[in-house]
Amino acid sequence: MHILETISANTGLPVTDHAFDRILAALAATTDPWKVVDLADQPFNLTVEAVKVLADEGLVRFEDGQVHLTESGTELLRSRGVVPPKSFRCPACAGTGLSLTDLEDAFSTFRSIAEGRPEPTDDFDQGVLTPESAMRRAALMLQNGDVTGKRIAILGDDDLMTLAIGLAGKPKEIVTFEIDDRYVRYIREHAERLNIPATVLTFDLRKKLPDELFARFDTFLTDPPENYAGLFLFLERGFGLLKSGDGHAGYFGMTLTESSLRKWSRLQQWLGDEHDIVLTHLIYEHSEYENWGFLLDSIRNDVEPYRHFPKVNWYRSSLYRVETLSDFQPENISFEGEDIYSDEERLVYSKKAQRTPNGERR
Amino acid sequence: MHILETISANTGLPVTDHAFDRILAALAATTDPWKVVDLADQPFNLTVEAVKVLADEGLVRFEDGQVHLTESGTELLRSRGVVPPKSFRCPACAGTGLSLTDLEDAFSTFRSIAEGRPEPTDDFDQGVLTPESAMRRAALMLQNGDVTGKRIAILGDDDLMTLAIGLAGKPKEIVTFEIDDRYVRYIREHAERLNIPATVLTFDLRKKLPDELFARFDTFLTDPPENYAGLFLFLERGFGLLKSGDGHAGYFGMTLTESSLRKWSRLQQWLGDEHDIVLTHLIYEHSEYENWGFLLDSIRNDVEPYRHFPKVNWYRSSLYRVETLSDFQPENISFEGEDIYSDEERLVYSKKAQRTPNGERR
């Protein structure tokens, strides 16, 4: 089908019939262009390019920032047997399976702290979890015994997970790596006030870990950048922080908006091939993010509906929990000189990746 | 620690400090011996042997079929820093993230059908999902677009998933492989009555698939036996049923009661190494099973608390959803002559595996 070839040629991404059908199904479910991205579960640029090509072909039309299937678009769906997805997401827990009822006090304190946080900036690839999602990550960690009495490392903390975890549970120690001074100060100040045993360090994760941090932790948590180089850097660093042997845990978010399932697959293979690590939980769309002010400036602006700021939260990540097995050994590798923020599946690719084409590593 | 060595020597299973601590934490949370197995997330024989050795050492005592930590047991936990696990499982969806509210009619019909089903027997490794869990599996499949208009294969169906899926959604066709004639008849009869487009076949999955079934399906579902040979047979057969290329889905349950995380890890590696398959969902303890009448006859009977029939459902499995990627190719292999039901991590090992020692394949 020539539409698929056009989309593929324009994005440099492979486009299968299945991927195309997922985008069509999303268009059948909603006219909100951002919800289309959310439901399609395809890399952002692929979905946006598909919307553009479908409009060029008269299969969708744009109106007031919304995307409507035309009559021929509806006919295309019918001929391909595409139907809109149904949702059975539990409203009580937003589909996560995790209840915050027993964490009400911690959550209430956390929410008010989160309201005062510094604004995210695209200098550091920031974009923050809703307070509910942050607290639900803490709940999962607690439930798995990865908090109480444990040494926890957090790699990048614009989500304020240091405070969410410290409010929800009783870790032995939290060490947080954060590059943005505003967040360093904000987390330190509140951790001190709340007697959370946290140390916040400004540290470039591309450098090797110092001896006092290497292989010293029970648990790590990160929301990594999702280009290949950044993803593997953050995770390699996370694993480098964990003690050797079994029973240590890593938590991280992965989207299908900035990563393809191919990337997920490579990641999953790498966990077992390079390390002795098993996946214990993969909670689909566990985490929801707040819309960030610099969104429209960071993405392509050639498709009309995506020039309007989103009215709903639409960016979600799935939560991975992985656990070390008995042969696990942390490593301490240098990544100095790597571009850790771009590749062609990323939201920001159309601008940033072209600035730094050498950073790719497939 | 000599306790760990004793447990390991008596079970033939590796026992790490972490595994031992998980069992201790479970003992701190409940005195119900079956809940201990549920919470510990270790192979059944490992947990039961640990309870036995702890009793021999005076660290727990048995009373009225319950397991109580003694004073020295409590002291051991304190010295090891072990605390009971907390649960944040959402009560509305039993921690699955999936609501049945929009499936009420289907669920109500299904529940009454499930009440009349034939009794499970250990001739075929049966043990059935609660109706809630069966319907929640159907809900997840529907939500992922793996039901409507799709060809679905079900490998083994004492759970009556043919009927749950047929009631909840509109598949194009369901083909169900079932070896127990009683279930074959029961499913056929209700499928016909309910106009569910299902074909139920009696077929030994060790044999190669006939041409009219090989590589013809969009989705498969199975609750495989969890010894290595049975697990890989059922999954290999499931993948052999799927069409080539991307976007086809497999669903299967895996426990931590009959499988170790090491087995999970090997399985996860195999998915990507042998096939081009990615894990998209891993819902921890999604599925709950009803207690089965032959339980006490099928397990070891040398540890007093485990001679009492359980009062609660305690056997759970996590639900894997995997998806094929673009290079996926189904295969059609013969497994004739394999013992597909035993290995040392299984519930039934202490009896069955000794009957058929040749079946092991590590």
Image (spheres, coloured by chain):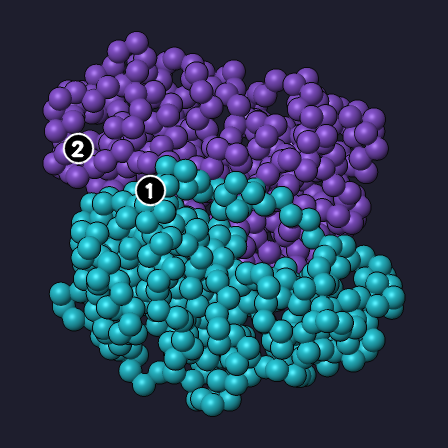
Chain colours: A purple, B cyan
Do residues under tags 2 and 1 come within 8 Å of each other at their CB atoms?
Answer: no
Query: Where residue A108 appears, x then y in whole percent?
Result: 69, 26
Location of residue B160 (image quadrant): bottom left
B305 or A294, nearer to the observer: B305
Tell me the element at label 1. Answer: helix
Q: Is residue A289 left or right of residue A187?
A: left
Residue at the extreme top of the image, as rendered = A64
A315 or A109, nearer to the observer: A109
Q: Which mark is residue A77?
A: 2
Question: Crowdedness of circle 2 by 10 Å Cα count: few (<14), some, many (20+)?
Answer: some
Query: Where residue A333 appears, x then y in whole percent?
Result: 62, 50
Which quadrant of the rendered structure holds the N terminus of chain A? top left
What's the residue at 71%, 68% (across, down)? Answer: B66
| Chain of the residue where label 2 is placed in the rendered structure | A
Q: Amino acid at mark 2?
A: Leu
What's the residue at 28%, 37% (across, down)? Answer: A22
The answer as to whether the residues below labels 2 and 1 share one chain is: no
Tell me the element at label 2. Answer: helix
Q: Is residue B282 left or right of residue B4?
A: left
Question: Crowdedness of circle 1 by 10 Å Cα count: few (<14), some, many (20+)?
Answer: few
B271 or B40, nearer to the observer: B40
Q: Amino acid at mark 1?
A: Asp
Residue picked out by circle 1: B105
B193 or B166, nearer to the observer: B193
Query: Does residue B248 appear in this view?
Result: no
Query: Does residue A102 appear in this view?
Result: yes
Location of residue A346 (image quadrant): top left
Location of residue B310 (image quadrant): bottom right
Query: Where residue A126 appears, x then y in whole percent?
Result: 56, 26
